[in-house]
């Protein structure tokens, strides 16, 4: 599987998504700010496409009580200040009923204040970081499980099932890396273990060579890569070159396609990655069959299945269900209440469970591995 819309020109993308999501005369507006350009543009465009096809699917079925849905989409280039500016515009100028499918960097506390001030819901924030989940406030409804669930899944496999005792940790040298490193330490401690070795790596991977040499010599059974795609990929490249043989596993924060592009399928082979959404080709799940049908019916022919677009599709379906339950002409606050009422909401093999207190709706985690041809196996 390859990344959605890799060959799409950006102006063409804006036009395509606008057409998919409905005409300008739409009565119900859903607002989205995503990184459509910049370093994470592939993921942002895929996410936006998934949202758009979910909206197009709903419009084809008659909208919500006869009202058409429209997606108002703005590019934040992955910049926190632009995300906030876009959010203000979506609320005040576009009159969005809710926000959804955010992808890119943002300050969770600042965004939470804005959401609370305007009493508007955000469905899906593109992060499982503890800081984001804890500071995003009651108006943010998270579709991803937290990184704690991902770390627990990886440690359980390596230690409990594969009996590996020498587990090293490589964390990105920032707040994100520090928080997940702490989670990994706790998971190991619960099993009577301490990290076999620990190292840090900057977000650009500039010292990947030296760090890889050190960890290759350490002789760990496994290394947990608690990092984004670029530093993780560069570490993998240098670790292989240094003769490292440890099993490598990363969080869902790493996009396997970006790692393969960076280092090649041969070197990326065998790297495990946690996933927090169903495999986009797993047609055993009704959700995946629905998603694929929506992509065939409403996405450009050049679009490929991806984790990013299925995440967007889930965000779109969840938002539309809340709007449907809220009823015609519902206020933003009533939409928030409708989202909180999505208890054991089964999209077809992917369950969300929100309530008056709970804002992290999913517990879904599965482990995948990059194969020799650059795709994923499960």
Image: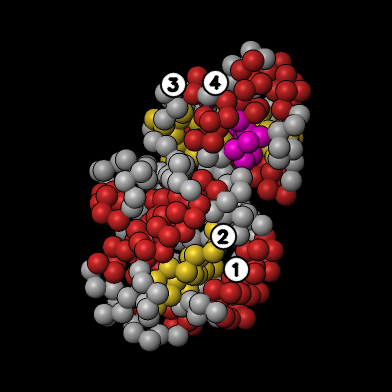
Q: Quadrant of residue 259?
A: top right
**First of labels 3, 4 by sequence position:** 4
The answer to whether residue 132 shows anywhere in this view is no
Question: Marks 3 and 1: which is nearer the front?
Answer: 1
**Quadrant that contains the N terminus:** top left
Q: Disc 1 on helix, strand or loop?
A: helix
Question: What is the crowding at mark 1: few (fewer than 14 residues within 10 Å), some, or many (at least 20)?
Answer: many
Which of pointers 2 and 1 lies earlier in the amino acid sequence? Answer: 2
Can you tell which mark lies on residue 86?
1
The answer to whether residue 359 is left or right of residue 28 is right
Task: Calculate the distance from the C-alpha at mark 3 to the C-alpha at mark 1.
Answer: 41 Å
Q: Which residues are magenta?
A: 221-233
Q: Which residue is mark 2?
A: 75
- Residue 281, placed above or below residue 101: above
Residue drawn at 59 percent across, 38 percent down: 229
Q: Which secondary structure, mark 4?
A: helix
Q: Which residue is mark 3?
A: 372
Q: Nearer the viewer, mark 1 or mark 4?
A: 1
Q: Which mark is residue 267?
A: 4
Q: Position of residue 112 (x, y in %)?
A: 63, 70
Pointers 2 and 4 in contact (C-beta within 8 Å): no
The structure residue drawn at horizontal position 58% and vertical position 30%, both measured from the top left corner, is 262
């Amino acid at each position: 599987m390859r990344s959605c819309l890799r060959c799409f020109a950006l102006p063409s993308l804006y036009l395509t998504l606008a057409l998919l999501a409905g005409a300008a005369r739409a009565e119900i507006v859903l607002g989205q700010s995503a990184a459509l350009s910049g370093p994470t543009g592939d993921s942002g465009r895929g996410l936006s496409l998934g949202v758009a096809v979910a909206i197009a699917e709903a419009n084809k079925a008659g909208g919500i009580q006869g009202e058409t849905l429209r997606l108002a989409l703005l590019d934040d280039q992955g910049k926190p200040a632009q995300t906030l500016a876009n959010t203000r515009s979506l609320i005040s100028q576009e009159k969005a009923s809710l926000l959804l499918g955010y992808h890119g960097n943002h300050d969770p506390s600042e965004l939470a204040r804005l959401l609370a001030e305007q009493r508007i819901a955000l469905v899906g924030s593109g992060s499982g970081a503890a800081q984001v989940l804890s500071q995003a406030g009651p108006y943010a409804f998270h579709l991803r499980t937290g990184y704690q669930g991902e770390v627990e899944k990886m440690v359980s496999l390596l230690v409990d099932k594969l009996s590996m005792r020498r587990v090293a940790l490589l964390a990105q040298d920032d707040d994100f890396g520090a928080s997940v490193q702490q989670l990994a330490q706790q998971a190991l401690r619960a099993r009577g273990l301490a990290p076999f070795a620990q190292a840090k790596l900057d977000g650009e991977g500039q010292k990947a060579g030296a760090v890889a040499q050190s960890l290759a010599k350490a002789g760990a059974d496994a290394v947990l890569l608690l990092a984004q795609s670029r530093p993780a990929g560069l570490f993998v490249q240098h670790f292989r070159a240094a003769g490292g043989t440890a099993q490598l596993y990363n969080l869902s924060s790493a996009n396997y396609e970006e790692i393969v592009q960076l280092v090649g399928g041969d070197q990326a082979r065998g790297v495990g990655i946690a996933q927090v959404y169903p495999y986009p080709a797993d047609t055993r799940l009704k959700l995946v069959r629905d998603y694929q049908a929506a992509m065939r019916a409403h996405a450009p022919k050049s679009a490929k299945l991806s984790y990013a677009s299925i995440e967007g599709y889930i965000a779109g379906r969840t938002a539309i269900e809340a709007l449907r339950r809220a009823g015609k002409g519902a206020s933003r606050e009533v939409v928030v209440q409708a989202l909180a009422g999505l208890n054991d909401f089964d999209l077809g093999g992917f369950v969300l469970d929100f309530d008056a207190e709970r804002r992290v709706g999913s517990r879904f985690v599965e482990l995948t591995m990059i194969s020799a041809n650059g795709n994923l196996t499960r």
